Image (spheres, rainbow, N blue to C red):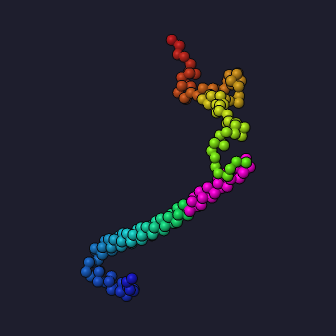
């Protein structure tokens, strides 16, 4: 970008030393360094934003191609399903001895074929709010296992000896 060699840098430093002075030169150099750092960060942010927008455009194109392919697959599935259904109706109609066209009344009249009805849903009867433990309650009571949770303060208050008057 810039063709600055060591000799040109030394010349710029000497001129800056004479013009700015030795007292202000470190502060000016620090300020110039911070400004150059900010400029480099700004340029890198712009480059990153451009790269992101390019990648976003590529992803949009890829999304469009995938959606198009999915649409094509869906259409082919629908056409093959329609062809399969037509062939199925023709083959089942020829087995039953009826005409090859689809007749909805013939399916409703065969009570032997479609008499099986799905059983109604029956709830399992479990009460999910109750916890069922593997250890019986009578064993917990005999062994002294705590069955009710208490906070630490409640436990201390429960077992604190009573004051005698």
Q: Is residue 111 positioned above or below 130 on the image?
A: below
Locate residue 89 relative to residue 9 in the image: left or right: right
Q: Position of residue 112 (x, y in %)?
A: 72, 37
Left or right position of 143 against 3: right
Residue drawn at (30%, 75%), measured in percent from left and top?
25
Q: With 29 as the anchor, is 71 left or right in this view? A: right
Q: Which quadrant of the view contains residue 19?
A: bottom left
Q: Is residue 32 placed above or below 71 in the rendered structure?
A: below
Q: Residue at x 45, y 69 (%)?
A: 54
Outermost top residue: 165
Q: Give the range drawn in magenta.
A: 72-96
127 to 108, vertically: above or below: above
**Residue sitting nearer the eye, 14 or 36:** 36
**Which SS type dominates the magenta stretch?**
helix
Q: Is residue 91 left or right of residue 14?
A: right
Residue 44 appears in view: no
Query: Is 95 contained in the magenta span?
Result: yes
Q: Nearer the viewer, residue 86 or 22?
A: 86
Q: Tell me where residue 148 appears, x and y as whole percent.
A: 60, 26
């Amino acid at each position: 970008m810039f063709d600055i060699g060591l000799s040109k840098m030394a010349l710029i430093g000497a001129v800056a030393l004479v013009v700015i002075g030795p007292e202000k030169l470190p502060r000016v150099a620090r300020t110039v360094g911070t400004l150059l750092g900010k400029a480099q960060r700004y340029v890198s942010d712009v480059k990153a934003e451009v790269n992101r927008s390019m990648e976003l455009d590529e992803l949009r194109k890829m999304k469009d191609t995938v959606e198009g392919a999915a649409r094509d697959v869906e259409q082919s599935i629908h056409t093959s399903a329609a062809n399969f259904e037509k062939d199925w109706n023709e083959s089942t109609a020829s087995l039953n001895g009826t005409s090859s066209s689809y007749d909805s009344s013939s399916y409703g009249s065969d009570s032997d074929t479609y008499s099986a009805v799905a059983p109604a849903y029956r709830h399992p009867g479990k009460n999910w709010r109750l916890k069922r433990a593997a250890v019986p309650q009578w064993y917990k009571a005999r062994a002294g296992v705590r069955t009710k949770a208490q906070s630490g303060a409640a436990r201390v208050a429960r077992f604190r000896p009573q004051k005698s008057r």
